[in-house]
Image (cartoon, rainbow, N blue to C red):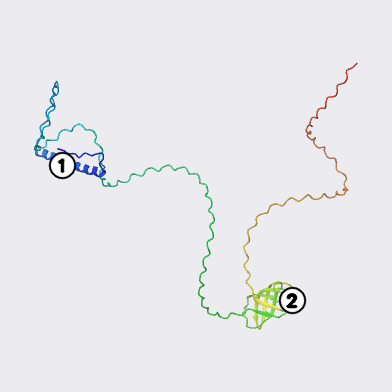
Amino acid sequence: MISIDKLQPGDSLENRRRKFNANALHIYAVFQQLQRGVDAGVIRGPQGARGYQGAQGSSAGAPGSQGAQGAQGFTGTVGAQGSQGVQGDQGSQGSVGVQGSTGAQGDPGDPGPQGAQGAPGNPGNPGAGGAVGAPGAQGAQGQQGAQGTVGVQGAQGGDYGATSSSAVTIGTGAKSFAVVSGLAYTAGTRLRISSLANPTTQYLAGQLASYGGGTLNVTVEKAVGSGSSSDWQIALDGEIGRTGTTGVPGVQGDAGLEGAPGAAGAPGAPGDSPPGPTGNSGAQGNPGPKGFRGVQGTQGVQGAPGF
């Protein structure tokens, strides 16, 4: 005998789950009993045909009192499983069972075909420019670094500064200047020899030809100013730089405005030659355009009738 613990509408989820598990275990136990009966060879005979219903009596007798419940008989052997009965009405929905474990992940499907490329979207409006941030505060001044050690003094350089009181005329070519001995000049050194009174308007520039015995012999290549001087200051001059590359031709300027026509010249005197022959008559010109029609005059006053 199957005893089912029915679900009630007011049962909680936990009670529904408990009843469901208990009913499942009970049904499983009954099924095992049926299986053991089949295995033991106990076969229940076929069910007999249902008898016809008797005719109804003319009057119903008075209902008798309910008899005492008899003692429960012994459980008979389980007969063979009968044919499946007609499907009963659908029961109320059972409680949700415990979620099963996740199944193994299936193999990845083949990649689908690539979709058609969408039309390009409309360009968005440019965003408004952000406001200029306020200038940050000035950082604190760092500490002064430690003073480095003084380097070793370099070797005494050669003496290239000199003066001369030789009276020399400003101009190009060979020039000689009396100077002190012991200077560091060597042949080929470029020199600039300027007047102490006018160093920017009177000077010579050239190459040292020789130096010895207190005399500088210079080949002057550039002379600025005129006259002569006897208060010269002598110093090293830079080497002449290489000629630069030719610059790109400039863009041609716009054409100038057309000048005003010049005044008509005076008529020339008549020539001595006799006048030439009369030229042929020119072709007749095209007729001029037709003039506009004049405005119609006002009508005159009507005369008096005749006698």
- Residue 161's disc is none
Quarter in which the C terminus is drawn: top right
Q: Secondary structure at mark 1?
A: helix
Q: Nearer the viewer, residue 288 or 243?
A: 288
For disc 2, the marked residue is 228
Asked whether, in this view, residue 145 is left or right of residue 185, the answer is left
Decide: few, some or many residues near mark 1? Use Cα within 10 Å; few <14, some 14-19, many ≥20.
few
Direction top: furthest residue: 307
Q: Nearer the viewer, residue 305 or 279?
A: 305
Tell me if residue 238 comes above or below residue 271 in the rendering: below
For disc 1, the marked residue is 29
Decide: few, some or many residues near mark 2? Use Cα within 10 Å; few <14, some 14-19, many ≥20.
some
Select label 1 or label 2 by which is in front: 1
Q: x and y percent of residue 2 in the render?
A: 16, 38
> Which circle's residue, 1 or 2, is located before the other in the chain?
1
Q: Nearer the viewer, residue 218 or 281?
A: 218
* Residue 274 in which image quadrant: top right
Q: Residue type at mark 2?
A: Ser
Q: x and y percent of residue 120 in the render?
A: 48, 44
Asked whether, in this view, residue 113 is left or right of residue 56, the answer is right
* Residue 156 in which image quadrant: bottom right
Asked whether, in this view, residue 236 is left or right of residue 294, the answer is left
The residue lying at 13 percent from left, 40 percent from top is 33
* Number of dots carrying numbers: 2
Q: x and y percent of residue 171 in the render?
A: 72, 73
State how far apart marks 1 and 2 are (Cα).
142 Å
Q: Residue type at mark 1?
A: Ala
The residue lying at 23 percent from left, 43 percent from top is 15
Direction right: furthest residue: 307
Q: x and y percent of residue 277 in the render?
A: 85, 41
Q: Secondary structure at mark 2?
A: strand
